Image (cartoon, grey):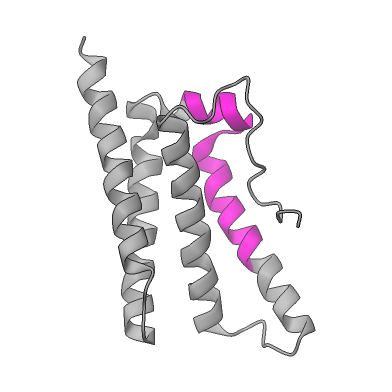
Amino acid sequence: MGAEPMKAIREETVENCLQELQRRSNFHNVPELTYALTYARSCLKAILENASLSELAELFKNAYGKDIRGFVPQCVDEEVKAFLKDAGCIGVSENDTQLREYYEYFCILGLVLRVHGIFRGSLTPKSTPPKIGEKSKP
């Protein structure tokens, strides 16, 4: 009985983060992007810190076969680096801070969407989860 209120609190926290990340994704300038990314990073940090206080860590492990606390930050970092490397092929500087922040924001948003999907039961151990960090096929 004590676990259910904690579960509800954690689901609500992820839901609130997701809604706020979606709302903030319509930035118009660099300061808005920086502010939104700061929020996204703190949101992701809170979700990862609280994962062990709810069943999220176990749900993530069942869905993806990975530990959420180590895998998610590594995934964001690797995905951003791969994106910037690809951007370098078309003449965009791999050191473009604004582009890095923009892409990192949407990586975090995508990961929070997947965490939200785990809580909502759209991912079960029997279903095939989308591969985190892999580019989608056309």
- The spot of residue 54 in percent (x, y) is 34, 26
Q: Is residue 103 above or below residue 76?
A: below
Dividing the picture into quadrants, the one containing residue 37 is bottom left
Residues in magenta, as a range = 58-80
Say if the magenta span includes residue 114.
no
Q: In this view, does 8 lie above or below 70?
A: above
- The spot of residue 80 in percent (x, y) is 61, 66
- The spot of residue 124 in percent (x, y) is 55, 23
- Number of numbered tags placed on the structure image: 0
Say if the magenta span includes residue 62.
yes
Identified at 29% across, 34% down, the residue is 10
Q: Is residue 133 above or below residue 83?
A: above
Dividing the picture into quadrants, the one containing residue 20 is bottom left
Identified at 76% across, 86% down, the residue is 90
| Pick the front one: 106 or 40 | 106
| Pick the front one: 16 or 46 | 16
Relative side of 90 to 3, left or right: right
**Image quarter (top left, top right, bottom left or bottom right) of the C terminus:** bottom right
Relative side of 13 to 79, left or right: left
- The spot of residue 2 in percent (x, y) is 20, 13
